[in-house]
Image (cartoon, grey):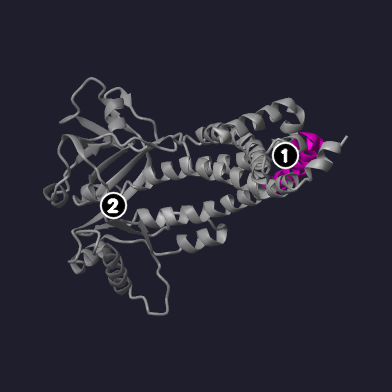
Amino acid sequence: MEILELFKVAFNSLRTNKLRSALTILGIVVGIFSIIAISTVIEMLQSSIEQGVSQLGQNTFQIQKWPPVRTGGPGEFAKYRNRPDITLEEFYALKEKLTQAKYVAAEQWSGGKRFTYGNKETNPNVSFAGVTPEAFPNNKWIIDKGRAINERDLQRYENVVVLGADIAKTLFDYIDPIGQIIKVDGHKLKVIGVLEKQGSFFGQSQDNFAITPLTTFQSFYGKRSRSINITVMSYGKDDYENLIEIAEGYFRTIRKLSPTEENDFSIFSNESVLTQINDITAGVRIGSYVVAAIALLAAGVGIMNIMLVSVTERTREIGIRKAIGAKKSNILTQFLIEAVALCLSGGIVGIILGIIAGNVAGSFLNASAVLPLDWIMIGVILCVVIGIGFGTYPAYKASNLDPIEALRYE
């Protein structure tokens, strides 16, 4: 009850000096706002990125020409562009060697395609891929209607296609697409399946693609038209990391790379992309924490100054309290709680504004809204620590006032 009464006294003191209190807690608001806003935006981005990059199946990695995330300039681009394309022959050589894997699949992609059915057509932004059957489990592609591409389709160069959910809806809104004939680049393809909807990533649909047997794709566009991506799935989590090392060694052997030469290919996994994203966002976090730390330090000094002024203004009050039996600990606790209440007032405002601003900023990037509970707790703890840290000296000074001298104070 005494603690509750002290908090009531503390907040009454804040209301009595509204302008002074508002100016004092402004630094706390800015500091906590910076931390919460940046953390909210980064968590929103990471959440959306995790959903997007987790398109690979569990315990699956991919060998490809290009790195999944490029942060360098033109020089880096030229380096990766000059890497040799991964060929179908290299895929089959790796598949033959990699007996430890559960599935080894090949994919060859081309963008900017337009599919047509009768008088209906898609926008010219559809991704089109030639794949081997193992690509379905490796990419978590689940059939909603019809069937997937099989080995027979691959061997016989069948002109068949499996559609993403968006294309199926655009071309066959009220018609069963299975068995229908569609066209792309003048080639006719029979629809044999439709995939389950996968949602969007940063506002971009992940269902705007179509897949055909790799042999059929290469008969349309040629074997050397673009590099192949190789996806590999392990039998379980325990042998996943070991399989990555084995696959890397085998592919280096296939490429005839000497021990001193660096890889002329990249290995992409959900974990590797998230690590790179975390490395990129780490600098932003550090910058925001520096700004927040400076603001909080300035706010802490301001709180100490205001609390010292408050002690001076309330000297007679302290003397009266001591005269009627208040102990040093009572006075110390009272002024510490007032300092903490001052910080918490600013912290709560900063947290609310930070969450709102962070989610608004993240929404412009089409990221899903989040509530960073861990950083909210950290913000509250920081407010308490600052209140105690910078309020201790004024509280100590108040508790050690001589009651006789305090009562004589004018």
Mark 2 or 1, closer to the camera = 1
Q: Amino acid at mark 1?
A: Lys
Residue 146 relative to residue 302: left or right: left
Q: Camera-side residue: 137 or 38?
A: 38
Q: Residue furthest top?
A: 174
- The residue segment tinted magenta is 296-318
Residue 71 image offset from top left, x and y in percent: 53, 56
Q: Residue 140 at what x, y percent from top left?
A: 25, 45
Label 2 sits on a secondary structure element that is: strand
Is residue 328 rendered to the left or right of residue 187? right
| Residue ID for mark 1 | 322
User: Where is residue 68 shown, x and y percent of the image?
Assistant: 42, 54
Q: Is tag 2's residue or tag 1's residue first in the polypeptide sequence?
A: 2
Main secondary-structure element of the magenta-colored stretch:
helix
Residue bearing the label numbered 2: 107
Task: Tell which residue pokes out farthest to the left in this image.
Answer: 152
For residue 367: magenta?
no
Q: Would residue 5 be found to the left or right of residue 66 on screen?
A: right
- Quarter of the image that includes the N terminus: top right
Occupied quadrant, residue 401: top right
Specify whether residue 42 is in view: no
Q: Quadrant of residue 149?
A: top left
> Which residue sits at x=41%, y=54%?
273
Task: Identify which amino acid the numbered label 2 is placed on.
Answer: Glu
Report the front residue among 170 and 98. Answer: 98
Q: Is residue 162 above or below residue 18?
A: below
Please say whether residue 317 is one of the residues in the magenta stretch.
yes
